[in-house]
């Protein structure tokens, strides 16, 4: 069964979102999840949010339907504390380097 984000994987928009995520990880001293399917899902959903709104809303903390007034952007405010406490962010996109 196809996933809702499959149609964006490999597109220019997806690759841009992936590059943005890699830069965010590098700047924070983190790594992306080694599970490529999880990265594909989170980055794919974030790409869909960007395509719809022009902003990178966190797909894991968003309301349904997306609320552009209150939902968090990625990276979210709590990401650093989540990684410090749990070794990973809530979305399991960014991980602490070991």
Image (cartoon, helix red, strand yellow):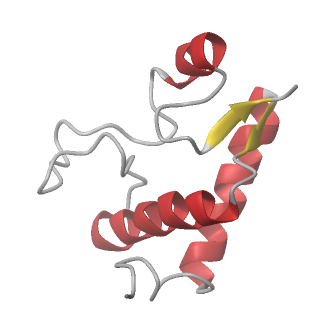
Q: Farthest residue to the front: give it.
A: 1
Image point 41% across, 65% down: which residue? 45
Image coordinates for residue 26, horizontal then vertical, percent = 81, 39
Q: Is residue 39 left or right of residue 51?
A: right
- Look at the picture and state if 35 lies above or below 24: below
Question: In the image shown, does 53 or 48 lie closer to the viewer?
Answer: 48
Image coordinates for residue 82, horizontal then vertical, percent = 53, 19
- Look at the picture and state if 25 lies above or below 76: below
Image point 73% across, 40% down: which residue? 25
Quadrant holding the N terminus = bottom left
Image coordinates for residue 77, horizontal then vertical, percent = 45, 23
Question: In the image shown, does 55 or 72 lie closer to the viewer?
Answer: 72
Quadrant holding the C terminus = top right
Image point 69% across, 47% down: which residue? 33
Question: Which corner quadrant of the image does residue 14 belong to?
Answer: bottom right
Question: Which corner quadrant of the image does residue 62 belong to?
Answer: top left
Q: Is residue 27 left or right of residue 50?
A: right
């Amino acid at each position: 069964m196809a996933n809702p984000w499959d149609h964006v994987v490999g597109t220019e928009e997806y690759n841009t979102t992936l590059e943005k995520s890699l830069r965010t990880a590098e700047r924070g001293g983190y790594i992306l999840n080694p599970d490529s399917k999880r990265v594909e899902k989170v980055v794919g959903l974030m790409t869909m949010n960007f395509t719809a709104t022009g902003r990178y809303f966190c797909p894991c903390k968003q309301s349904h339907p997306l609320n552009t007034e209150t939902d968090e952007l990625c990276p979210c405010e709590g990401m650093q504390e989540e990684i410090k406490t749990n070794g990973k962010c809530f979305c399991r996109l960014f991980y602490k380097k070991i």
